[in-house]
Image (tube, rainbow, N blue to C red):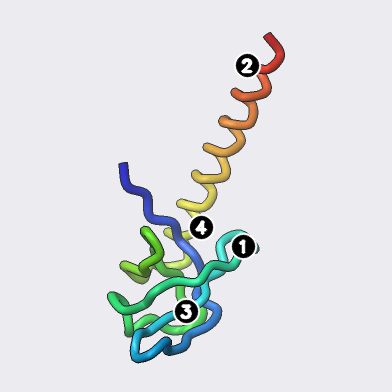
Amino acid sequence: MCLAVPGRLVELGDDRGTAVGVIDVEGVRKDVCFALLPEAQIGEYVLVHAGFAIAVVDEEAAGETLALLREIDEIDVADRGAKGAR
């Protein structure tokens, strides 16, 4: 299964001719390759898969996806806690 995670673009740069940047996902910053999405602008939300920015998404869609990911994490943490209590 593939999963693309949204993050807000906070820095753009160039690494030997390749567009690179930094995204912020819930306070965690990650280096990302923007070779597939050179038109992205600082402040926009992008979907990232396997270290590559693959699409620009609007803030509302990014927020909905991040909320679902938080919910999945909460379920996983609760599930692990229940299994440990047995």
Task: Find numbered disc 1 in the image and state the secondary structure of the residue it sits on.
Answer: strand
- The single residue placed furthest to the right in the displayed view is 85
Residue 21 numbered mark, or none: 3
Q: Is residue 77 left or right of residue 23?
A: right
State how far apart marks 3 and 1 are (Cα).
Answer: 14 Å
In which quadrant of the rendered view does residue 26 lie? Answer: bottom right
- Residue hosting label 4: 63
Which amino acid, by three-letter code, is at mark 3? Answer: Gly
The relative height of residue 64 versus residue 83 in the rendered view (above or below) is: below
| Mark 4: few/some/many CA within 10 Å (<14, 14-19, 20+) | some
| Mark 2: few/some/many CA within 10 Å (<14, 14-19, 20+) | few
Residue 84 numbered mark, or none: none
Q: Is residue 3 left or right of residue 22?
A: left
- Residue hosting label 1: 28
Q: Residue at x 42, y 80 (%)?
A: 20
Task: State which tag comes first along the sequence, 4 or 3.
Answer: 3
Asked if the residue under mark 1 is in contact with the one under mark 4, i.e. CB atoms within 8 Å, the reply is no
Q: Residue at x 68, y 8 (%)?
A: 86
Task: State which tag comes first along the sequence, 1 or 2.
Answer: 1
State how far apart marks 4 and 2 are (Cα).
Answer: 30 Å
Task: Find numbered disc 3 in the image and state the secondary structure of the residue it sits on.
Answer: strand
Asked if the residue under mark 3 is in contact with the one under mark 4, i.e. CB atoms within 8 Å, the reply is no
* Nearer-the-camera pick, 76 or 63: 76
Which amino acid, by three-letter code, is at mark 1? Answer: Val
Which amino acid, by three-letter code, is at mark 2? Answer: Lys
Which amino acid, by three-letter code, is at mark 4? Answer: Gly
State how far apart marks 1 and 2 are (Cα).
Answer: 29 Å
- Residue hosting label 2: 83
State how far apart marks 4 and 3 are (Cα).
Answer: 20 Å
- The single residue placed furthest to the top in the displayed view is 86
| Mark 3: few/some/many CA within 10 Å (<14, 14-19, 20+) | many
